[in-house]
Image (cartoon, rainbow, N blue to C red):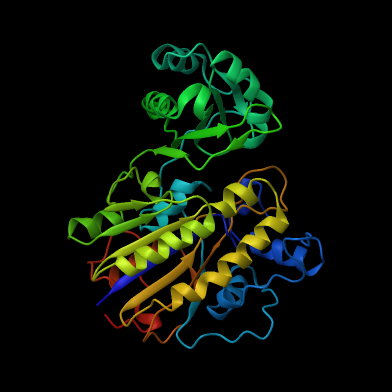
Amino acid sequence: MARAFLFVLDSFGIGGAADAERYGDAGANTLGHIAEACTEGRADREGLRNGPLFVPHMASLGLGKAAETATGLGFDTGRTDLLATAFHGAAQEVSSGKDTPSGHWEIAALPVRFDWGYFPDTVPAFPADLTEAMIRIGKVPGILGNCHAPGTEIIERFGEEHIRTGKPICYTSVDSVLQIAAHEVHFGLERLYEFCKVVRKLVDPLRIGRVIARPFIGETAATFERTYNRHDYAVPPPEPTLLDRLTARGSRVIAVGKIGDIFAHRGISEVRKAAGNMAMFDEALGAMDDAGDGDLVFANFVDFDTEFGHRRDVAGYAAALEAFDRRLPEALARLKQGDLLILTADHGNDPTWRGTDHTRERIPVIGTGPGFKGGDIGLRATFADIGETVAEHLGLARGRHGTSFYRSIGGHA
């Protein structure tokens, strides 16, 4: 029996990207700067957490070693011993972005070799003909925002006007994205989704990676709150991914969290969603229980990114990592002979960095499985090595991108 479990800690970069300067991110290090802040007491928050970063179970899989591989600098993991079956390393992204689709597609063995389209950091941010078409075809009285902005801030700024006028709030960032915020009740959730589908078609010629529905509730700027009914409308991958290859041969791919949206629901057998990392962890555990021979459980834990990275909340990010780590033994206990578990990330989002956007970083590649010999997999030249390792473990023929490290960790399939 061979099963694979791929858990993405969204935005949990470990620094060291060789091309970080090109993106304005030289020195960014999500893990390193969180750990440093914790050690110095800058991530203490009454009632939430205090002291050095404490993630012993990820440390036992080699998180500290992965950090050393990425930057030459580790972090204090205490006296945690490595599991005999654990493997560890880091990976450099070759895709031309630091966004969610690029990272996930590359993890699934399909690097993004083309350039995404982006909106300029101007006001207005969107071309006039696009704005006109959004209003006319989407049948809305106008749009608000039309700029680069953090999601929570722009809802606070325009939310009351949105309720009053019925105009959706449209904004972007340094990523290839057009986000649309609207009130779940006053505007309507289904109406928001339909409007996003209209906009998705309109931005296809501009090579925009995602249109994201950002519903919220509340009646005033002080009470507005985004809900977990977010929906991403992504461009489908231009070639078959690991997911397509698996489902084509009859295996199941169980997508937990926003994985289905990221891949435009291609190569996905089943989607399971929940509100928040811990509820998502419950769904991931249930998927592990349900997975059969040849199946993949692909889970994304988005709160690290949306709730803490973008909001530059160091203490919140640290607490979320510690909460995830406390539950990791539940996943490890479910591993059977023939199983492979990999923990990784899709990009960085250093909560100590300037601005509110993602950061170009290397990612951790740590994991285990009963019967593996483990060890150091070094610095991988592309995230696609992760997908090709999973492919080899599950008995697929080699793909076009990436190099499996399966045999180096004692693959036994």
Query: Relative to 319, is 133 above or below?
Result: above
Query: Quadrant of residue 13 in the image?
Result: bottom right
Q: Position of residue 251 (x, y in %)?
A: 22, 62
Q: Residue furthest left?
A: 249
Placement of 165 over or under 154, stated as above or below: above
Picture residue at 58% right of the left edge, 71% below the top: 326
Q: Position of residue 400 (x, y in %)?
A: 29, 59
Q: How many marks?
A: 0
312 or 237, nearer to the observer: 312
Point 44% across, 83% down: residue: 374
Note whether residue 324 is visible: yes
Where the C terminus falls, by quadrant?
A: bottom left
Nearer to me, 19 or 90:
90
User: In which quadrant will I find the N terminus?
Assistant: bottom left
Q: Is residue 150 visible?
A: no
| Residue 66 locus on image (x, y percent) | 57, 73
Asked whether 398 or 318 is in front, the reply is 318
Residue in the foreground of this view, choosing between 408 and 152: 152
Residue at left offset 66%, top offset 43%: 356
152 versus 365 height, above or below: above
Would residue 28 appear left or right of 227 to someone viewing this image?
A: right
Q: Position of residue 351 (x, y in %)?
A: 69, 53
Residue 32: name its quadrant. bottom right
